[in-house]
Amino acid sequence: MTPLASTALGIIAGGGRLPLLVADAVRRSGGRPHIFAISGEADSAVEAYPHDWLSWGEFGRLFRILREKGCEDVLFAGRVSRPEMDKIKLDAVGMKLMPSLMRLTLGGDDDILSGVVRIFEERGFRVRGVADVAPELLAPEGRMSRRMPGRVDWQDIHRAVTILKVLGRLDIGQAIVVDREHVLGVEAAEGTDALIERCGGLRQWGRRKRTGVLVKILKPGQEQRVDMPTIGPTTVRLAAEAGLAGIAVEARRTILADREETVALADELGVFLLGIAVSRDDEP
Amino acid sequence: MTPLASTALGIIAGGGRLPLLVADAVRRSGGRPHIFAISGEADSAVEAYPHDWLSWGEFGRLFRILREKGCEDVLFAGRVSRPEMDKIKLDAVGMKLMPSLMRLTLGGDDDILSGVVRIFEERGFRVRGVADVAPELLAPEGRMSRRMPGRVDWQDIHRAVTILKVLGRLDIGQAIVVDREHVLGVEAAEGTDALIERCGGLRQWGRRKRTGVLVKILKPGQEQRVDMPTIGPTTVRLAAEAGLAGIAVEARRTILADREETVALADELGVFLLGIAVSRDDEP
């Protein structure tokens, strides 16, 4: 793979701090980031870097600027909401891509994202992932918080991982909440934040004590370059509010961009934060 | 099995109309229902039948009255919320049962319910189910609504059943929402109503058209006498509000107590309502 430094990296930026943190990491390692900020999604802080603002649907313009700026590599970072129809500004290329994009939305998440990757690759761009260009933004293995998981928490983590492996094969469920072996919630399309919030109200007797864990692992076959599990301070705050004991994420396969802030908050709120290695029999 | 008519049936009644509809059905078939209405849960309409009000935890009193009234059979009907600690009024027998009840809450749903059944059976009562004493309250096989599922709906139903069978083996998920093969939501502890409500906001492009189905089947190993899947007018109303095309439930294994009202509402709101036969390889 061509080292990043020799070419510019186009960062297609959704919301949150991740795009900026990726750009920082790329620059630190000698790369040249150029940010494509999605209107209505990206934070204006990305303007600290060379950048262009883009509307949903402006594929032609995106491909043209990518080429002009010498970006052979592209990376998707930051959360995006489903665009409202009237916010979509289709240029000629966007128009041509629309039927295949619409078709992609008929499959599961993985199909959509793999399809998007393919659209870029077919035009000669290499799609890079955070793991690839900024591995320091991934969760490490081991305990990050001061609080340690207890015996029951470990049982919950074990049960959660077992279930997530099965769910992953069905292309559902990056995340699950298990409280004393009882499955409180399974994430499908609603996102991890919504999952945690509803589980707060569902915990069984003994609420005064923190129990239950949120566990998040990569789905087998999940497009790692575009859709890595991600946690941050919000995840920790919601877990604490829901009364959970802690959070376990897959080490080296979960983006933990604001690591310092996230760990500090976990310590302040008394939840544990753990990176776990997940064995996968089905992997090459 | 002893015919019901020869003995009184103790109906332990939670909320909603189901306890009353079961009592009606039992009386129609010549049985003698006696209702044990749980305070704060049961509807006062159950007072139309011989009845006693009970607080959570009054197990000793319950067992005593069941014997006094000659109830050899008991049936649980109606929804219950998780009781608040300060609403629980433990009598001596309740006190003695508490440790095993607390232990039960550590397992999955099925463990809890099987445990409750066992507590009654150990004292010589037979636990009956709705399927057993009032089969006319179950969903029939086939289409009940005027609207028919389309080709895509059938694909969604098929995918949903495939996934539910896998989830059921993990003791999670009676219900799921699939929209054009995309899994929008999986039910764990939050209940079907909450599942449908959140899926309304998650549907993909093309919202103007009703798409997506709610599918609900019995979990393998689910305690059919105590915890049958149940739908009613609220389910239909929420599905319509969420923009779903329809609802498919397992025929003869789903309680559809208010059938007339439920089907009328489905027709009014334009959603389909279907009873499907589910093949189960793992059954004897």
Image: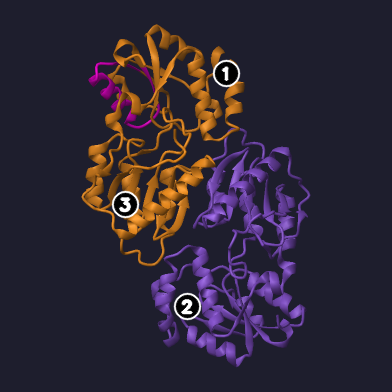
Chain colours: A orange, B purple
Q: Is residue A25 magenta?
A: yes
The circle on residue A97 is 1
| Residue bearing mark 3 | A246
Residue linked to disc 2: B56
Please identify the quarter of the rendering in which residue A6 is found: top left
Residue found 62% across the figure and 33% down from its top:
B206
The Cα–Cα distance between marks 1 and 2, rounded to whole angstroms, is 61 Å
- Residue nearest the observer in this picture, A17 or B254: B254
Earlier along the polypeptide chain: callout 3 or callout 1? 1
Question: What stretch of residues is rendered in magenta?
Answer: A10-34
In contact (CB < 8 Å): disc 3 and disc 1: no
Depicted A7 relative to depicted A21: above or below: above
Asked whether A236 or B181 is in front, the reply is B181
Q: Cα distance, mark 3 to mark 1? A: 43 Å
Q: Residues within 10 Å of mark 3 (few under 14, many from 20)?
A: many
- Of A172 and B238, the residue lying toward us: A172
Question: Residue B214: where, in percent of width, then height?
Answer: 63, 49
Q: Total number of numbered labels?
A: 3
